[in-house]
Amino acid sequence: MARKRGRGMAACWYGIARTATVDRAGAWAEIDDGGSAKIVTGVTEIGEGILTVLAQIVAHELGVKPADVVIGDNDTARSPEAAHAGASRQTYMIGNVVALACREARARLAGVMAEVWDVEVDLIRTGNGECWAENTNHRITMGEAVDTCKKRGVVPVGSASFGTDTTGLDPSDGAGRPWQAYVFGCQVAEVEVDTITGEVQVLAVWAAHDVGRAVNPKGVEGQIEGGIVQALGQGLMEDYKLRDGHTSTSGFAKYILPTSLDVPRVNSIIIEDPDPIGPLGVKGIGEPAMVPTIPAIMNAIYDAVGVRITSLPATPERVLGALREKQRLTSLQAAE
């Protein structure tokens, strides 16, 4: 048969946030006139969807509607430090600090409303743009609640800082705490290998990942799918070459990238094992999504045709070379 199918599996663990150094982030939050929410943090949106995640967190924590959440200017000259968009840290670091800032702002509003309504502060509830007291008939809009606060001289504003308790590794014994939060994942890849051309096609990937608490499940699935496609490109196509210190792949004519036609069917399984330290229980799923993909594909190639590809990418030329070497060794063994 010219085409053979195989399946391979790989697992991974990954540390969230900056490595072996204290990561940190700050945020300000305010419930503003009309019941809208204003958040200021130095977060950077580069396509990962953090602004949507923050809007959901703010809406949940303050009780406003997501459409009424305004993420302020992230100019670091005017906003608290948030550090970089990387290390799969945005949801973990910025999400947690924004939640803490929102809780302080809400506590100010709840304290005033409890005093006005003469109830215990624990009975104050907020949600969907409204504020009410449990087991009573007291219910007003968040805009009215803010107006009540300000007439009593209270601005429902909060600030917070969130940092990690991490250390470097001891050179003598390797002991240390390089990360505060860890995620785990496992993927199974199914491939089809053409033994005549050496071409490998990834048919499907099953990806199960622990993400802590999933704030936006669709966003999580999108990041898993994106990581898998990126890894597929690295594992099978992208071949950056240098010659005498200069690149010989200076354009996309020779540096091949996956297209929509190369994307396999991805079956995402979200595992929610909340982080025990952060207030939200979130972790992250950026870089971890692509870590097990390549070894799973390479194991699937081995399952299909019995050859190990140990140098990336697994181009048709490399696969054919491995198949010919296998055939040569088999012939030698038969001759003996």
Image: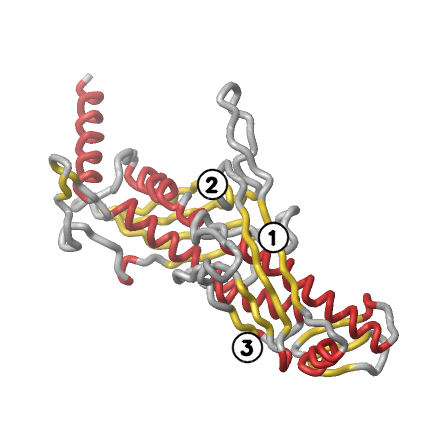
Residue bearing mark 1: 161
Q: Which residue is mark 3?
A: 67
Q: Which amino acid type corresponds to the residue marked 2 in the rendered image?
A: Cys
- Secondary structure beneath dot 1 equals strand
Residue that extends furthest to the top in the rendered view of this protein: 336
Q: What amino acid does circle 1 point to?
A: Ser
**Separation (CA) of disc 1 from disc 3:** 25 Å
Q: Which mark is residue 70?
A: none
Q: Secondary structure at mark 2?
A: strand
State which quarter of the image contains the C terminus: top left
Q: Foreground residue, 110 or 291?
A: 110
Q: Residues within 10 Å of mark 2 (few under 14, many from 20)?
A: some
Q: Residue at the spot x=15%, y=49% of the render?
A: 250
Cα gap from disc 1 to disc 2, whole angstroms: 30 Å
Looking at the picture, how far across and down is residue 45, in whole percent? 43, 62
* Gap between marks 3 and 2 measured at Cα: 37 Å
Which circle, 1 or 2, is nearer the viewer?
1
Question: Mark 3 or mark 1, which is nearer the start of the sequence?
Answer: 3
Residue at 37% from the left image edge and 40% from the top image edge: 295
Q: How is the image coloured?
A: secondary structure
Q: Give the camera-side residue of 150 and 126.
A: 150
Q: Amino acid at mark 3?
A: Ala
Which x, y percent locates residue 317?
Answer: 16, 41
* Badge 1 or badge 2: first in the primary sequence: 2
- Looking at the rendered image, the disc whose residue lies closer to the viewer, 3 or 2, is 3
Give me the residue at 26% from left, 39% from top: 312
Asked if residue 110 lies left or right of residue 173, the reply is right
The residue drawn where x is 86% and y is 68% is 120
Q: Which residue is mark 2?
A: 12
